[in-house]
């Protein structure tokens, strides 16, 4: 009842190299109602990045104050920089009838679940194997061997938390994996609490006499 | 854990005329792994119906004995005839890795949920309105006005049980309704308990050294 017609908060996690970015981009391209929320970060803007569009760029003191005021639905330290999603931004999107896509790890997913309960759905993208993940990371050619080793360790750590997710998607075939991810999203929009106002409207309407 | 890799028991209910038959036929055509279980019935075979393929045709005494032995996962009386799905048939399908589609009403869905718990997913197809349902039933041209009135009363009764379903699908547009139904089915196959063996296999495999 409480979340009748409320939007979907879709969390997609995966080890680096499992194809999450490709899958999420495609999902956003197909569903205009699905948005990324603009995160807060303490890192320096890169060339071309616009404050308020790509991120809200803030200093560490501002960020810490927001943490102290419990204004973040989730936040994390990544490579020495803080990143966080403001509760207000999520509430705003939900109030506007939009769904929000989150690219966060299991800790971010856990915080979102604690704050938003069943409005959150947690999806984990599985690589076919760690060997295949290593192969993909090497094929990218962007990371030094020790960076790849570190990513694989992080991947193993992420994988150990698979039991915290609602759904698992094996990305051994891009089309199948995409079909699974979009199906999970579409199904969420049809959960009974989100659509029961439609059933009530049918029952409340005047009888079937009109035609 | 308990239902790791077990199949999906998909229950689709709707008032007569809401498009359930079309949607279910299409789903079975797309997914070869999804089967209808062969029901038991006490009604007389129609021309062309084959015992063991279309139904298991049994007499009332045999049916009642099966009820007494608790051999049915669900059963119901429809137009003076008994129809039921044997637990054994469902278990057989699940053991063979197949998913089973059930075309039953809320009472059948409830019995299946009681027996199989989370392995069952309950989907209700909503007509746009009772007025539209009346229009569709009249357009078919197969039923007398009083039969249509009776069907509409039954439809209203069915609709009152919307809160017993996990998912609601509004069939005001066939393609969208089909996309929703297939998404619910595909999503079920990716629920974590069904696929966590894949995550465990990745973690249990020897490290990422091989390539």
Image: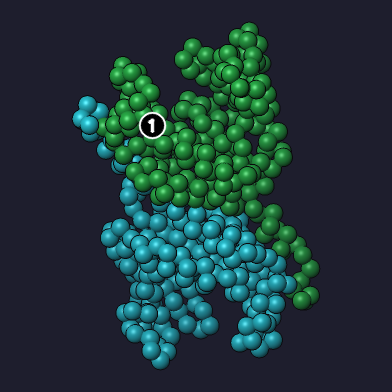
Chain colours: A green, B cyan
Tell me the quarter of the image containing the C terminus of chain B: top left
Q: Residue at x 68, y 36 (%)?
A: A93
Q: Residue at x 38, y 67 (%)?
A: B35
Q: Is residue B129 left or right of residue B37?
A: right
Query: Residue tagged by mark 1?
Result: A17
> Is residue A68 visible in the rendered structure shown here?
no
Q: Nearer the viewer, residue B61 or A196?
A: A196
Q: Residue at x 34, y 37 (%)?
A: A127
Q: Is residue B38 above or below residue A193?
A: below
Residue farthest toward the bottom in the current orientation of the protein: B47
Q: Position of residue A157 (x, y in %)?
A: 35, 25
Given the image, what chain letter belongs to the residue carrying mark 1? A
Tally the marks. Answer: 1
Please tell me how crowded label 1 is: few (under 14), some (14-19), or many (20+) other residues with Cα within 10 Å.
many
Q: Position of residue A211 (x, y in %)?
A: 76, 76
Q: Nearer the viewer, residue A135 or A56?
A: A135
Q: Is residue A65 left or right of residue B197?
A: right
Q: Is residue A41 above or below residue A109?
A: above
Tell me the quarter of the image containing the N terminus of chain B: top left
Q: Position of residue B81 (x, y in %)?
A: 47, 82
Q: Nearer the viewer, residue A39 or A25?
A: A25
User: Dot 1: what SS?
Assistant: loop
Q: Is residue A172 above or below residue B75?
A: above
Q: Position of residue A60 (x, y in %)?
A: 60, 9
Q: Residue at x 46, y 56 (%)?
A: B185
């Amino acid at each position: 009842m409480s979340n009748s017609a409320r939007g979907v908060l879709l969390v997609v996690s995966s080890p680096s190299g499992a194809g999450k970015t490709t899958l999420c981009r495609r999902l956003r391209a197909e569903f205009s109602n699905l948005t990324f929320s603009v995160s807060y970060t303490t890192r320096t803007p890169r060339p071309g990045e616009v404050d308020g569009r790509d991120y809200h760029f803030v200093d560490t003191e501002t960020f810490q104050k927001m943490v102290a005021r419990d204004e973040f639905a989730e936040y994390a330290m990544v490579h020495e920089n803080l990143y966080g999603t403001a509760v207000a931004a999520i509430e705003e999107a939900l109030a506007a009838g939009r769904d929000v896509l989150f690219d966060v790890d299991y800790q971010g997913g856990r915080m979102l679940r604690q704050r938003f309960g069943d409005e959150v759905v947690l999806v984990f993208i599985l690589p076919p194997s760690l060997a295949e993940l290593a192969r993909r990371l090497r094929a990218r050619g962007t990371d030094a061997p020790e960076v790849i080793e570190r990513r694989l360790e992080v991947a193993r750590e992420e994988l150990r938390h698979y039991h915290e997710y609602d759904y698992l998607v094996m990305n051994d075939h891009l089309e199948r994996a995409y079909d699974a991810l979009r199906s999970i999203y579409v199904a969420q929009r049809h959960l009974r609490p989100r659509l029961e106002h439609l059933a009530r409207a049918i029952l409340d309407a005047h009888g079937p006499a009109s035609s």
